[in-house]
């Protein structure tokens, strides 16, 4: 896993620290997020996994910054923050990006990964996997 940090200047003239942690397709990673009930949730599994479609989201290429394996993206960047968001979104039928009650924070955390994953060397070939439903996430 490669981790890098940069400083971004926001329009309000404040400095925002952003970091991107690359993940390897096929490796096991742990996704974590806080749901709308304030519970800390986790799930561990393969980066690039394909859960199949739920009521709202396609669940392929988990960890890729962008929509699924072929949707809108700047490249095929696989990162920790995008993995967190993808897994949260699938388990919570998330929609609405940053405004989603369960996964909005994970979405916001992944924004810099979406923009900078290529510069940070997170680009990989997308896997082509059959769908396999995941086990349950743990929320405590």
Image (cartoon, helix red, strand yellow):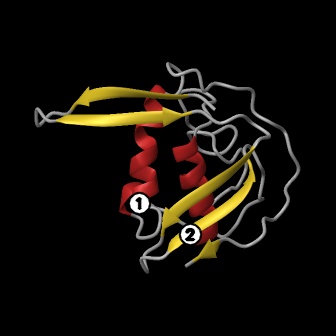
The foreground one among 134 and 17 is 17
Q: Secondary structure at mark 2?
A: strand
Q: Residue at x 60, y 53 (%)?
A: 86
Q: Which mark is residue 48?
A: none
Q: Residue at x 64, y 74 (%)?
A: 138
Neighbourhood count class around disc 2 (C-alpha, 10 Å): few under 14, some 14–19, many 20 upward: some
Judging by the rendered image, the residue that carries numbered circle 2 is 41
* Residue 34 in the image, given as x and y percentages of width and height: 46, 68
* Residue 95 in the image, given as x and y percentages of width and height: 49, 62
Q: Residue furthest right?
A: 130
Spatial separation of the CA atoms under disc 2 and disc 1:
14 Å
Q: Residue furthest left?
A: 13
- Decide if residue 34 is on the left or right side of residue 42: left
Can you say which quadrant of the picture contains the C terminus? bottom right
**Mark 2 vs 1, N-terminal side:** 2
Can you say which quadrant of the picture contains the N terminus? top right
Q: Residue at x 41, y 60 (%)?
A: 104
- Mark toward the viewer: 2 or 1: 2
- Decide if residue 35 is on the left or right side of residue 50: left
Q: Which mark is residue 104?
A: 1
Neighbourhood count class around disc 1 (C-alpha, 10 Å): few under 14, some 14–19, many 20 upward: many
* Residue 88 in the image, given as x and y percentages of width and height: 57, 62
């Amino acid at each position: 896993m490669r981790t890098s940090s940069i400083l971004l200047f926001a329009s309000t003239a404040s400095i925002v620290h952003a970091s991107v942690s690359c993940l390897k397709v096929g490796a096991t990673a742990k996704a974590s997020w806080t749901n709308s009930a304030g519970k800390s949730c986790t799930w561990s599994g393969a980066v690039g996994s394909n859960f199949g479609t739920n009521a709202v989201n396609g669940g392929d290429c988990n960890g890729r910054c962008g929509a699924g394996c072929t949707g809108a993206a700047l490249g095929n960047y696989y990162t920790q923050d995008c993995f967190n968001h993808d897994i949260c979104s699938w388990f919570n039928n998330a929609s609405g990006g940053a405004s989603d009650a369960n996964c909005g924070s994970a979405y916001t955390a992944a924004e810099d990964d979406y923009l900078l994953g290529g510069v940070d060397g997170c680009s990989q070939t997308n896997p082509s996997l059959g769908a396999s439903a995941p086990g349950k996430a743990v929320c405590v």
